[in-house]
Image (tube, helix red, strand yellow):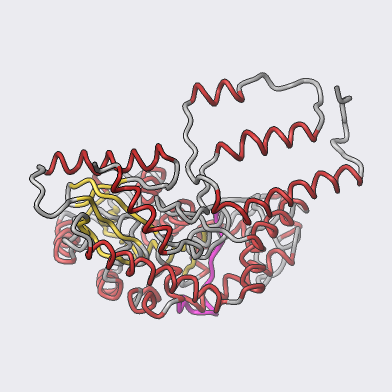
């Protein structure tokens, strides 16, 4: 039994040996993950049996704790960076960024204010400038902040929109979004205290884009009823289908109506680095605010979201507070305190992983990876359309494709087809050989593949489709 350690320290030799084992485990993960089963399934009872205990009063051997975590915790987690992790939005990550996160955590760098770490603040400024340029936002007036993810970025954007467009009274304010907008937007709206009567969920077209006519009708009706339309949320890459709303048209409407235009590009925004993606995202530069998620298609580890904003003074005007305990660290106006740009005061050094990975690989590598993903989805669509068994429900769009098993000449009802495709998904998941779940499109249960992992091959997809077919029998 280890003795108590009131300083919470290990010797230099113990730290080195421990650290080498951690790095070796991470390297082994990146090197061999494609050889493992990606899916982990367990019940709460099974997890309780394995982990549930009282907090130990006595110290333990650090080696035994590490061995237990590597053997039981890591192995019980789905590998979202696996080449056959197709569902939700996978997290491909990269080794350089993982090590950068280790540095940021190991040195415990506070990235809230300039005085605590000018280098951390400067790197956030620099990397945000990179993103502003990529998305065509104004370099001088624009700004932003790194967040934990898209949910927090969307929340920060809506708080800012409410402050700028409504001031203190938002009792008559109305916000608009489509029925394909990400659920984090609804959660943010609810958190901010808006009632259901202040939310307009606009139906989408057959192609899952905003119905512009219905949107215009809703805005006109609200104005006639004495309400205050203040914010519109467009989507650049919906989670369900990868669809991009009519961004240019929406930006014109927002300008005419004096409505804040927020674009949720958490999923699809990074596609702007590809030629085809840039065409699809035309108009994204017109947003008042834009959410992008580097921990998705910019290949960063969790957690890293980002909010870009056309006028950074809008962030400062919304979130700056002047408590007396921070009066000695305010600095001058060029020294940005990022706690004045968002909700968090205490912030981890998120910019480091993005900085180090872009510096190491170069944007050209990111461009090639994203282009590869888009083309891979298009090749998958061709395979599906050439098969007599598969029906494409939503074509390949920004690396997302939706399809279902529906053999030519079958006499199954829609209800039976739904059950069959649900059965296929369950069979694949139970096999643990691929992460593949369903969604609902046009009231049909469909299989959805999201292909943002640059290490996924066409063979990975073919093998998974063959596996799906075995569960359709």
Question: What residue sits 23% from the left and 51% below the top?
Answer: 404
State the image coordinates of residue 443 (x, y, percent, origin top left): 17, 47
Considering depth in this image, is 221 or 155 the residue closer to the camera?
155
Q: Is residue 403 magenta?
A: no
State the image coordinates of residue 193 (x, y, percent, origin top left): 37, 43
User: Does residue 9 appear to the left or right of 391 in the view shown?
Assistant: right
Q: Quadrant of the N terminus?
A: top right
User: Does residue 302 appear to the left or right of 160 in the view shown?
Assistant: right
- Start-end of magenta stretch: 135-147
Question: What residue sits 81% from the left and 25% below the top?
Answer: 59
Question: Which image quarter: residue 13?
Answer: top right
State the image coordinates of residue 464 (x, y, percent, origin top left): 37, 52
Q: Quadrant of the C terminus?
A: top left
Considering depth in this image, is 356 or 133 the residue closer to the camera?
356
Question: What residue sits 62% from the left and 55% below the top?
Answer: 30
State the image coordinates of residue 85 (x, y, percent, origin top left): 45, 51
User: Does residue 267 appear to the left or right of 357 in the view shown?
Assistant: left
Q: Main secondary structure of the magenta part?
A: loop
Considering depth in this image, is 360 or 292 the residue closer to the camera?
360
């Amino acid at each position: 039994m280890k003795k108590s350690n009131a300083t919470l320290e290990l010797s230099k030799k113990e730290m080195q040996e421990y650290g080498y084992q951690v790095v070796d485990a991470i390297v082994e993960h990146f090197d061999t993950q494609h050889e493992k089963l990606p899916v982990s399934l367990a019940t709460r009872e099974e997890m309780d049996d394995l982990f549930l205990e009282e907090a130990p009063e006595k110290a333990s051997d650090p080696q035994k704790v590490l061995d237990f975590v590597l053997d039981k915790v890591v192995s019980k987690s789905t590998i979202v960076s696996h080449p056959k992790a197709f569902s939700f939005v996978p997290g491909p990550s990269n080794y350089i960024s993982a090590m950068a996160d280790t540095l940021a955590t190991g040195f415990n760098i506070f990235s809230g204010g300039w005085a605590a770490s000018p280098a951390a603040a400067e790197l956030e400024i620099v990397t945000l400038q990179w993103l502003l340029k990529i998305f065509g936002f104004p370099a001088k007036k624009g700004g932003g902040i790194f967040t934990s993810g898209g949910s927090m970025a969307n929340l920060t954007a809506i708080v800012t929109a409410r402050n700028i467009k409504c001031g203190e009274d938002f009792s008559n304010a109305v916000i608009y979004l489509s029925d394909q907008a990400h659920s984090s937007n609804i959660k943010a709206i609810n958190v901010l205290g808006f009632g259901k009567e202040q939310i307009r969920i606009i139906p989408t077209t057959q192609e899952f884009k905003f119905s512009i006519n219905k949107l215009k009708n809703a805005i006109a009706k609200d104005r006639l009823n004495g309400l205050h339309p203040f914010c519109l949320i467009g989507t650049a890459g919906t989670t369900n289908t990868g669809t991009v709303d009519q961004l240019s048209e929406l930006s014109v409407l927002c300008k005419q109506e004096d409505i804040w235009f927020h674009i949720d590009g958490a999923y699809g925004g990074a596609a702007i680095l590809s030629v085809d993606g840039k065409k699809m995202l035309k108009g994204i530069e017109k947003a008042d605010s834009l959410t992008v998620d580097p921990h998705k298609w910019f290949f960063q580890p969790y957690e890293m979201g980002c909010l870009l904003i056309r006028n950074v003074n809008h962030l400062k005007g919304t979130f700056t507070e002047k408590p007396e305990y921070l009066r000695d660290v305010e600095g001058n106006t060029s020294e940005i305190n990022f706690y004045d740009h968002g909700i968090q005061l205490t912030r981890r050094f998120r910019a480091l992983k993005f900085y180090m990975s872009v510096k190491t690989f170069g944007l050209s590598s990111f461009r090639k990876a994203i282009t590869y993903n888009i083309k891979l989805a298009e090749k998958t669509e061709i395979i599906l359309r050439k098969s007599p068994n598969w029906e494409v429900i939503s074509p390949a769009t920004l690396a997302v494709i939706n399809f279902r098993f529906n053999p030519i000449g079958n006499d199954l009802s829609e209800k039976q087809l739904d059950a069959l495709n649900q059965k296929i998904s369950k069979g694949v998941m139970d096999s643990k050989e691929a992460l593949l779940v369903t969604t609902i499109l046009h009231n049909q249960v469909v299989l959805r593949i999201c292909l943002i992992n640059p290490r996924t091959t066409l063979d990975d997809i073919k093998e998974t489709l063959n596996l799906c077919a075995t569960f359709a029998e």
